[in-house]
Amino acid sequence: MDRAFGIDVSRYDGALDFFAVTAWGVEFIAMRSTISWGYKDPFFLTNWPQARARAIPRMAYHVLYPGEPARKQADNLEAAFAGDFDTVHDRVVIDAELEHDCSRRVITDSIFNLSVEIERRFKNLPLLYSRTEWLNRCVYGAELSHLDLWLAQYLKRWPWQQYADEHPGPPDIPTGFTDFRIHQTGDKTPTFCAGPVEGRIKGNQDYDRFNGDRAAVRAYFSMDQDAPPPAPAGLVVTNLTEGLNIRSGPSINYLVVGKLQKGAVRPVLDVSGAESWVRISEGWIARNHAGVTYSEVGPG
């Protein structure tokens, strides 16, 4: 296959053998970080920094519980990183497979609302992981078509096979979407890097293929771009405008996620766009736009 190879893992894969990961030519890796608002994968913080140390593009996937508050789920996800998240290179994935007796409307809204929280906190829209059959049945695809898809579609493992073959791709595209970013090509494919969990090594590995070659992977994860320098310490921003929009990113093209009262003061977490946008704990606010000064930055 000329599509870049990757894997996805969870606690069942244990502490990964990253020498094997490198030897097998893994170009990207996804790791389960969290489930809903209360569970953190016990091996996430073991494997997550190891991928960064080897410059392997990495994604963290959060298993969505539809109907549970998006903000609480995002709080759990954010806490799982323990500060180790690079907004230039790292990506977040919403794993949507559970229904929990929720309606199509509730599931769609749950994915959308969590995507807003993720974009606000991590500066990038999440990918959406699922299966085409599930998406066709459980969501209104057109309302989520702005999210990049990671689709699971496998070949059957026949009784005489120890492992299934990889699906050659491409996967079937669900209604409302036009393309995919990643294809999970197998869940019963050979293990090559799993570590022991409770004395046993998992017998199968999840394989993935990127919709593009190695260069496409590196471009998608901005691997040739330096991470931004941290914002100067000790600065605060004061809002000069009544009801200033708080947005999910540093542009008027991003969603409005709240309002900031006039006179409110917040610590500056980051700046963007020649310092015309400022990130605070709730999101991004304009400092200067179209010749108008909306907020003022100064010493704390």
Image: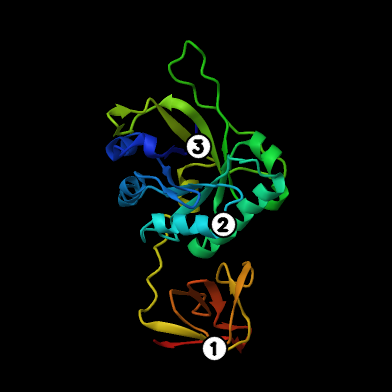
**Residue 25 visible in the displayed image:** no
Point 50% across, 63% down: residue: 121
Q: Secondary structure at mark 2?
A: helix
Label 2 crowd bin: few (<14), some (14–19), many (20+), radius 10 Å? many
Lower position in the chain sequence, tag 3 or tag 2: 2
Residue 209 numbered mark, or none: 3
In the image: residue 106, left or right of residue 203: right
Point 33% across, 33% down: residue: 194
Residues at discs 1 and 2 in contact (Cβ within 8 Å): no
Residue 120 at x, y percent in the picture: 54, 64
**Residue 245 visible in the displayed image:** yes
Residues at discs 1 and 3 in contact (Cβ within 8 Å): no
| Three-letter amino acid code of the residue under disc 3 | Arg
Give the CA distance from mark 3 to mark 2: 29 Å
Residue 221 at x, y percent in the picture: 46, 53
Label 1 crowd bin: few (<14), some (14–19), many (20+), radius 10 Å? few
Give the CA distance from mark 1 to mark 2: 29 Å
In the image: residue 145, left or right of residue 183: right
Instruction: Identify the residue position indicated by label 2 in the image.
Output: 70
Give the CA distance from mark 1 to mark 3: 50 Å
Lower position in the chain sequence, tag 1 or tag 3: 3
Instruction: Identify the residue position indicated by label 1 in the image.
Output: 263
Residue sticking out furthest to the top: 160
Q: Nearer the viewer, mark 3 or mark 2?
A: 2
Quadrant location of residue 169? top right
| Three-letter amino acid code of the residue under disc 1 | Gly
Q: Nearer the viewer, mark 1 or mark 3?
A: 1
Q: Secondary structure at mark 1?
A: loop
Quick check: 225 above or below 162? below
Quadrant location of residue 259? bottom right
Lower position in the chain sequence, tag 1 or tag 2: 2
| Three-letter amino acid code of the residue under disc 2 | Ala
